[in-house]
Image (cartoon, rainbow, N blue to C red):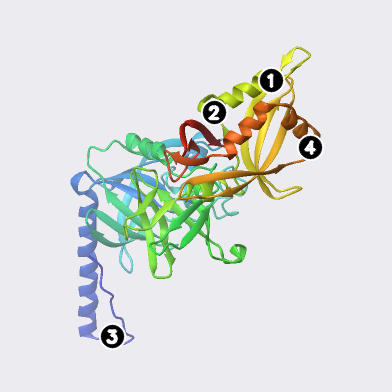
Amino acid sequence: MILPLVATSCFKNEEEDIFDNSAAERLNEISAEYADILTSQGGKWALEYFASEGMQGFVYVMTFRPNGTVTISGENPYIGLVVNGNGQTSMAYGSADSQWDIIRDNGPVLSFSTYNKFFHLFSTPEDLTGAAFGSGLSGRGYEGDYEFTLMKYSNDTLYIDGKKRALSMIMVRLPENTDDRTYLDEIVAASDGYFSPKIPRAFVTYPSGDRHVLTGASNLVMTVYDEKSEDPLTTSFSANAIISHSSFAFMKPLTYGEYSVQHFLPQEDGSLLCLDDNKTTISAGDLTKDCFTDTLQEWTSDLKAFTGPLKAALDELNSQLPKTNGFQRYVQAVNFGYARYPVQKLTITVVVQVTKQSKMSLVFYYEPTFPSADQLKMTLAGNDGGQMTTTYYETYSGLRNLLDDIASPTFKFSTASRLAPVEMKMVDSGNAENTMVVKAK
């Protein structure tokens, strides 16, 4: 249902007056139809709201009534600013009643005509500079819309455009018995299963194999660049997104050549699959080449999860370490990362607790090879040359065996989430009993 455009002219005559009246009558009819759509079947809707292109989207639950009242419920950190009242943000739920109407403009416009403190907070022209969550604009607030042009209705979905900023959004009909708080709590809980700030990059992989790189995705306001770009700094652009009750979506379609993607559904392996083409995916990429050896990423191993030869070597090293003033030294961590100075190399760092207050790091370098997807072999390539690193390596067979049991095998990586693999299991391809678990730092 789309309102037709109305022609106008500087000449006025009887026929044109009839045409104008007909257009006005049609606008009244469409406005009445939209009012009926909004209030029918319980009148409950989920609005996927965007205040601007520089902010993530949030879901609001709205219940429209024929008497012109509407209950608006939300759960987000901006509501936390209102609830806390002290400039501090935290996820908070809020629900309040206000008035709604459909006004006549160039087309039917849904207007929330009285102030709702949990919704109009995005459109209030206040000085928000320095607010704890998002800076806003001095004297202009977040410049969000509270009036929306009704574009069309199809399959229980209303397509709307913000009247002031012209941002396209949708409203999806909900069952009448939907509990606002429960529905929004479920969205907040589900959002933890998407991106993680501990994983610095994600990849949009198109059917051609080409990829867009996403950074900062956990904020849902991300920097995007073409993986093939020779100068990502100047060719990158920003994209914002929303997590709804069961899906992820960019505010605007993301395009790459012939491809245009916007809406994604979570898959069993934690990745996202595009609804628009059923082929494009979003994930952290290969667990080894893209993730574990990412120069932006550090990992620590769960020493209690060592099994097989790895555990035997760790136990051997711990038994060989000396006491210092009665304190028994022990391996505190085995970490993986990337050294930028004085060399640029991937590292294996064995951290030894020397006293209750101090520890030392024994740094070894490795070269990676990737036999197949999600497989990695680490070939030792020297150490940092430090006196203690050299002394420990030459003195303790347990350290040499531990490094050998890390570097000799080819490890197969697996994870519960291909989108946010904050924890991965490494299994020796030649000996399934030789395993370790690494966690993103």
Q: Earlier in the sequence, mark 1 or mark 4?
A: 1
Name the secondary structure under disc 2: helix
114 relative to 192, above or below: below
Label 4 amino acid?
Answer: Gly
Q: Label 2, label 3: how many angstroms apart (C-alpha)?
A: 93 Å
Q: Earlier in the sequence, mark 1 or mark 2?
A: 2
Between residues 79 and 334, which one lies in front from this camera angle? 334
Name the secondary structure under disc 3: loop
Q: Label 1, label 4: how many angstroms apart (C-alpha)?
A: 20 Å
The residue carrying mark 4 is 386
**Residue shown at the point (38%, 65%) measured from the top left:** 260
Determine if residue 307 is in view: no
The residue carrying mark 3 is 12
> Badge 1: few (under 14), some or many (20 or more) residues near its Cα, within 10 Å?
some
The residue mark sitting in front, 2 or 3, is: 2
Left or right for 40, reference 397: left
Q: Are marks 1 and 2 in contact (CB under 8 Å)?
A: no
Q: Are marks 2 and 4 in contact (CB under 8 Å)?
A: no
Q: Identify the mark at residue 309; answer none if there is no mark.
A: 2
**Residue shown at the point (76%, 48%) measured from the top left:** 342
Label 1 amino acid?
Answer: Gln
Residue 399, horizontal then vertical, whole percent: 66, 29
